[in-house]
Image (cartoon, rainbow, N blue to C red):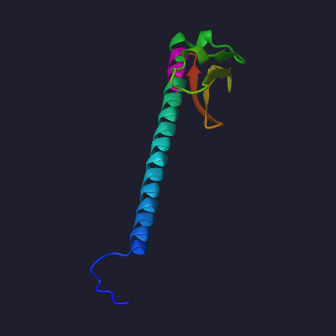
Amino acid sequence: MKRDGAGFTIVEIIVTLLLLGVIVAAVSSMFVAVRNMQSQDSYYDTADRAAGYEIESLRNKGYSSLTAGQVIDFTSSLPDNLPHGHGAATISTPQAGLRRVDATVTYVTGGVTHAVTLSSLIGEIGITQ
């Protein structure tokens, strides 16, 4: 059989289409992975801001309004875009004249529970670092 090389065979076309299909699938899965990472980052940022806002709110109320052992549920003030979000702040006394506020926000994505915890010390005469 004589071949003059003037065209493509069916096998070459099929192999080319398969390679293009694999490349398109790889690129599309990469875009999905990037989108998921952006969503996770957004949820973390939202949880971090919510915990910080609660600490600032408690700091503004002052030292005398905080009782050691107190647990404050601030779930109702969490943003709606945080999936299955729950917020709680725990007050403790690491030493006399100080209150420690640990604000924790938990949320669930993809069946995995994530938690963000921020802490701050509030003194009788002001804020300590």
The residue at the point 45 percent across, 42 percent down is 35
Furthest toward the right, the residue is 69
In the rendered image, the residue lying farthest to the bottom is: 1
Residue 87 image point, x, y percent: 61, 22
Using residue 72 as the reference point, say whether residue 59 is left or right of it: left
Front one among 116 and 62: 116
Q: Between 40 and 68, which is closer to the camera in this rendering? A: 40
Return the x and y of residue 107 as percentages of the image width and height: 61, 30
Image x and y of residue 120, in percent: 57, 27
- State yes or no: residue 81 in magenta: no
Please name the residue shown 52% across and 20% down the image.
80
Is residue 57 covered in magenta?
Answer: yes
| Rendered-image quadrant of the N terminus | bottom left
Q: Residue furthest front?
A: 1
Per the rendered image, the range of residues in magenta is 52-58
Whether residue 123 is situated above or below residue 11 in the rendered picture = above
Q: Is residue 19 left or right of residue 124?
A: left
Residue 51, quarter of the rendered image: top right
In the picture shown, does residue 28 fall above or below 87?
below
